[in-house]
Image: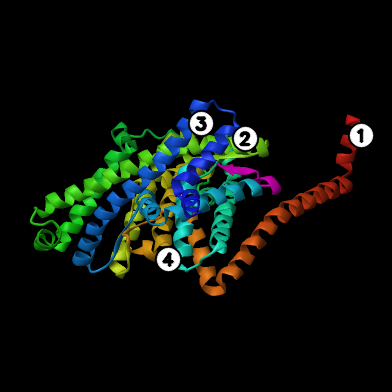
Amino acid sequence: MNMIRDFLLEPVILIGGIVFLGLVLQRKSFEIVVKGTLKSMIGFMIISVGGNIIAQSVTAFGEMMQQGFHRTGTILSVEGISGIAVDLYGSEISIIMVLGIVVNLILAKITRFHYVFMTGHQMLYMACMVTAVLKSAQIRGPIFFVLGSLTMGIVMVFSPAMIQKHTQKICRSDSIAVGHFGGFTYLLAAWLGKIYGENSKSAEDMKFPKKLAFLRDSSIIIALTMIIFYVAAACASSRSFVEHELSGGKDYLVYAVSQALTFTVGFVIITTGIRWFINEIVPAIKGIADTWIPDAKPAVDCPVVFTYYPNALMVGFLSSFFGGLISMGIMIACQVTVIFPGIMAHFFCGATAGVYGNSTGGRRGAVIGGFVNGVIMSVLPEIFLPFLGELSAQHVTFPEPDIGLAGIFLGKYLREIGAIGTLTVLIGIVIIMILIPEMIENREEGEEWFQYDMNPALKQKDKKKK
């Protein structure tokens, strides 16, 4: 019995199981089923290996920050923190992720929010965060997985739904949605663009320097950014501290550069594992969704909007990164935990915020949307860190705004009203999701009938048609 229990609770087995089921439902050939199942399992294990590497490099960074600035430093890297989380809580994360997918499918079926989240790596990140918060609150037993999967499933449906109106405008189609946990700032960027971007020309009218094209190479830009951060931390902590306490006699600048490159290697390993993982699990989820929810909208990764506004994405990215740097300077001055901007986090979230801002407010909307996104991505982790428990001391954290907001919501409610109270709130949200669209639709139908009944011109026009 112990062997069967351990087998079923092994995270890679659970991940492999859902991929296997999805591929079988699509009636794929035997070799495709075997290949897809094994690649998803190997990819999940690779993520854990990369997490170990990043954990070692950020420990040194944290010690140099503490010595040099007398305060804690934390880097925004969802890949890094998720890799560490998978290594610590692999079984719980895999179960919550699988159950979260089930909740997403159920909500897409029974509510008017027919969105099936297809971005596999984002699902993994959310499962990592939810697991860490629940562990920090010392929740145990079946309610651990009920709370985790409900939180995850609700956000996976709500995040694409709240920006769909703007996504439809950008993509010129209502058949697809954006499944990326920056939905809150994308909505905010579109709103701010509408308010402050009046008469502003589109960012697409700008000529962007070709020399900045290298910013789209993730591994190179990560390496450059980390080298700057690590060298600055090494210089601040002093040569003698690094060489006597950390590097074992190796030159302090050489040590800083090698640790920065080690972080980059961990990042590349994790992203490779994620690529293997999502390439197999996404078709599996689609197979299950197509079978059960034929009219579902697939919520896919944020780069789906990049091709429509390529200049706006670069404006949004640079504005977001600048917002992160400004926030970092304020945090240093205020002597609080310093959130270091992560280049990949600001690229994807900031660029997407820029696209949404540009869609309503031109280049001004792209700048404002990106900048506000960068500030929010720095402020939210500052509030969010105390709810992460063991992960809060890892010197690396989650940057995505929706993940931060969901974590603050879950952590705060667990502390104030406990597990049962939080479960009641989540069930209430589900009930509202079922009822509110029905009420809105009924109200809109009533308003249309009222306008028709009170407007003789509409009646006369209708008679002519008949």
Front position among marks 3 and 1: 3
Distance (Cα) linking label 4 and label 3: 43 Å
Q: Residues within 10 Å of mark 4 (few under 14, many from 20)?
A: few
Q: Please, what is the three-letter code of the amino acid marked with disc 2?
A: Ser
Farthest residue in the bottom direction? 416
Q: Which residue is mark 2?
A: 175
Q: Which residues are magenta?
A: 108-117
Distance (Cα) linking label 2 and label 4: 36 Å
Name the residue at 17% across, 61% down.
Answer: 236
x, y percent for residue 362: 49, 42
x, y percent for residue 368: 44, 50
Q: Is residue 418 above or below residue 211?
A: below
Name the residue at 54% across, 25% down.
Answer: 29
Name the residue at 60% across, 69% down.
Answer: 420
Q: Which residue is mark 4?
A: 383
- Among the two numbered marks 4 and 1 on one chain, the one whose residue lies closer to the N terminus: 4
Q: Please, what is the three-letter code of the amino acid marked with disc 4?
A: Ile
Left/right of residue 157 with respect to residue 40 in the rendered view? right
Residue 270 lies in the magenta-colored region: no
- Among the two numbered marks 4 and 3 on one chain, the one whose residue lies closer to the N terminus: 3
Q: Which residue is mark 3?
A: 33
Element type where label 1 sits in the image = helix
Tell me which corner region of the image, top left, top right, bottom left or bottom right, holds residue 117. Answer: top right
Element type where label 4 sits in the image = helix
x, y percent for residue 40: 44, 38
- Among the two numbered marks 3 and 1 on one chain, the one whose residue lies closer to the N terminus: 3
- Asked if the residue under mark 3 is in contact with the one under mark 4, i.e. CB atoms within 8 Å, the reply is no
Q: Residues within 10 Å of mark 2 (few under 14, many from 20)?
A: few
- Among the two numbered marks 2 and 4 on one chain, the one whose residue lies closer to the N terminus: 2
Q: Which residue is mark 1?
A: 463
Distance (Cα) linking label 3 and label 1: 60 Å
